[in-house]
Amino acid sequence: MVVGGGIAGLAAAWHLRQGGGDVRVTVLDGAGRIGGKLLASEVAGVAVDAGAEAMLLRRPEGRDLARSVGLGEELRHPGEAQAALLVGGALRPMPRGQVMGVPSDLLALARSGVLSPAGLARVPLDQVMPATLVTTDVSVAAYVRARMGGEVVDRLIEPILGGVYAGRAEALSLDATMPRIAAVARSERSLLAAARKITAEAPKDAGPVFATLRRGMGSLPEAVAAASGAEIRTGVMVRELRRAGSGWRLVAGPVPDPEVVEADAVVVAAPAPAAGRLLAAEVPKAAAELARIEYASMAIVTLAYPRVAFPQAPAGSGYLVPPAEGRPVKAATFSSVKWPHLAEADPNLVVLRCSIGRLGEEALLQRDDAELVALAMAEAAEILGVRGLPLDSRVTRWGGSLPQYNVGHLDRVARIRAAVAAQPGLALCGAAYDGVGIPACIATARTAAARILDHLASRQSGSSVA
């Protein structure tokens, strides 16, 4: 049994079927559809993602799964356009050679104009300052500010982390969100030297960094579900999980008319708050830790304009906005520039995706759809000079969708897994643990499935239900 029909849960179902031919798998999800934060729909006749729009290729799990379920020919890569930062109301190029916002090339940083003269002068002092010992996990902001100053945090780190986690650098864990920086920082006295080492060791001509699918990443869940052969049941909310002999009993559906389902093993692929509620009775230590994982909400406003509405065609793939700018839009993607296949679908259309909302900005997200569209349109008019009304618009709200990897996150995940490990036939997967990206979620699903298959094999059951 798999509880949760997002990409992690569906990937777990697929891996379960790959590893055990006679394993029967059922996926239960309380929503009316599968896919979680992967969803695509048409805007002005073009299929555009409403959630996550790409997967990182540095990790192979997403690409490999797409190919395995028959979507290899659908893979598409971004164009060569670069991203920008909105600083002081002006678009400035993202400095080359940065690692999650940490600069490695002082000349490129200076040319970008992202930092003030004083902020720029502060960065190289990192090379002569005494070492900042990182023996335990610290916040990203605390470490980077101590080494390179506040402007690097405010104008480079914050917008990048805000784009990935919709969170704040003051709270996010260095170990969990910047593992490469954290690892090198423990051996290098200088953060600048650490960033240079990472960029120097990066493979040259490694090809595209990201990929998507021709019909959007939202097309991946259905393909994985079909390939898994699992029974998929949507609109079924699991409310309770209990031990039942050597297996598990799940209680689903409305309280007045509950449905009891029994399974030999269970993969919980729900967000941390829901997973915590399910584990409260049998694994209270894990449940308590899961309840401490905070989530951020956001909305994506997608606008489709005629190309003539732009005084000049967007030159880059989009831009990120530091919180210090005080703007409601935290990121804007020129989707039809970033993804050439969208431009090919309608050359006369420019698709703009605006991301709104960070952790702590719930009041902003309480505005109705028309107000959010108006905010995105005002941004397009002010920053890009867009004239007139969009041909089409779409507002997609993702309430409580992005887990916050706050300081101590890795230790928390270790405690959760240690508690779950004591429960035969139970496993967890999803974005709450080892990474919020699609490949990371799929990796947790593969690990969860392997744990379940090992358990079922140890029982030497002729016919097992997961």
Image (cartoon, grey):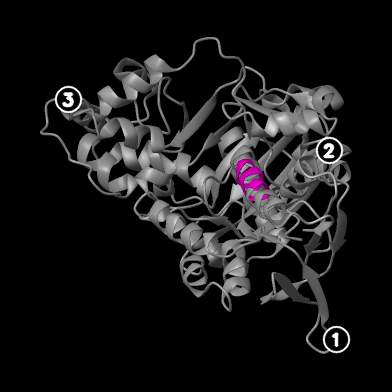
Q: Is residue 33 left or right of residue 381?
A: right
Residue 8 appears in the picture as rendered: yes
Residue range highlighted in magenta: 443-450
Upstream in sequence: badge 1 or badge 3: 3
Question: 21 or 26, which lies in front?
Answer: 21
> Pointer 1: what residue?
257
Residue at 82% from the left image edge and 70% from the top image edge: 236
Q: Residue at x 62, y 57 (%)?
A: 427
Query: How far, Cα to Cα, is label 1 from label 3?
Result: 66 Å
Report the residue marked by disc 2: 47
- Note whether 319 is above or below 76 in the view shown: below
Please identify the quadrant where the C terminus is shown.
Answer: bottom right
Number of the front mark, 2 or 3:
3
- Residue 280: quarter of image: bottom right
Residue 119, x across and y down, in percent: 25, 33
Q: Is residue 116 above or below residue 419?
A: above
Label 2 crowd bin: few (<14), some (14–19), many (20+), radius 10 Å? some
Residue 310 seen anywhere in this rendered image of the structure:
no
Q: CA distance from mark 2 to mark 3?
A: 48 Å
Q: Quadrant of the N terminus?
A: bottom right
**Residue at disc 2, secondary structure:** strand
Residue under label 3, please give it: 127
Q: Considering the numbered disc 3 on the image, is that residue within a helix, a strand or a loop?
A: helix
> CB atoms at circles 2 and 1 under 8 Å apart?
no
| Image-based side of 221 in relation to 411, left or right | right
Q: Position of residue 318 (x, y in %)?
A: 59, 32
